[in-house]
Amino acid sequence: MRLLDALVEQRIAAAAARGEFDDLPGAGAPLSLDDDALVPEEVRVANRILKNAGFMPPAMEQLRALRDLQAELNAVSDQATRCRLQARMLALHMALESLRGGPLVLPREYCRRIAERLSERASNSDMSAVEGSAAKVAGSGTQ
């Protein structure tokens, strides 16, 4: 294997010396790498090959959806909407867990408890919004 690596490195160095890499598209620009930090290292190359062939592994699509949800969550200030987005993120994390055959980041019991708390917060924020509206209506009737 070392002989093959040495041969590859030698050919790359020779091509670079001839200037074959000078006019490549994006030369000098930073690389745009996909965020696949949560994908096991031994699977990344296979995923990249599939992606270049026009196929997207389900786990990669779910990671992209998680990233999009996180961006949306960062932009939202409404508590009820935040709770719904967090619940969707939790569901995606659990789906990724089942695809990988093991826990992604959090144990299943912890995810269940988080989902319960998010549900409680969503119902409490909906109730507080209803109570706040009722208080405003009651307050406006007394003036």
Image (tube, rainbow, N blue to C red):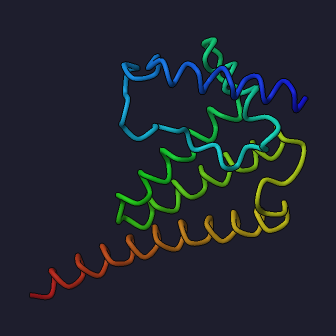
Image-quadrant location for residue 22: top left
Is residue 112 placed above or below 56 in the rendered structure? below
Number of numbered labels in the structure image = 0
Is residue 143 placed above or below 121 in the rendered structure? below
Say which residue appears at 52% left-offset and 47% top-offset: 67
User: Which quadrant does the C terminus fall into?
Assistant: bottom left
Task: Give x and y (percent) for residue 4.
Answer: 84, 24
Is residue 133 placed above or below 34 in the rendered structure? below
| 43 relative to 122 in the view: left or right | right
User: 82 or 65, which lies in front?
Assistant: 65
Task: Give x and y (percent) for residue 54.
Answer: 60, 13
| 1 relative to 33 in the view: left or right | right
User: 31 or 57, which lies in front?
Assistant: 31
Is residue 68 placed above or below 50 in the rendered structure? below
Say which residue appears at 40% left-offset and 60% top-offset: 74
Image-quadrant location for residue 132: bottom left
Say which residue appears at 29% left-offset and 82% top-offset: 135
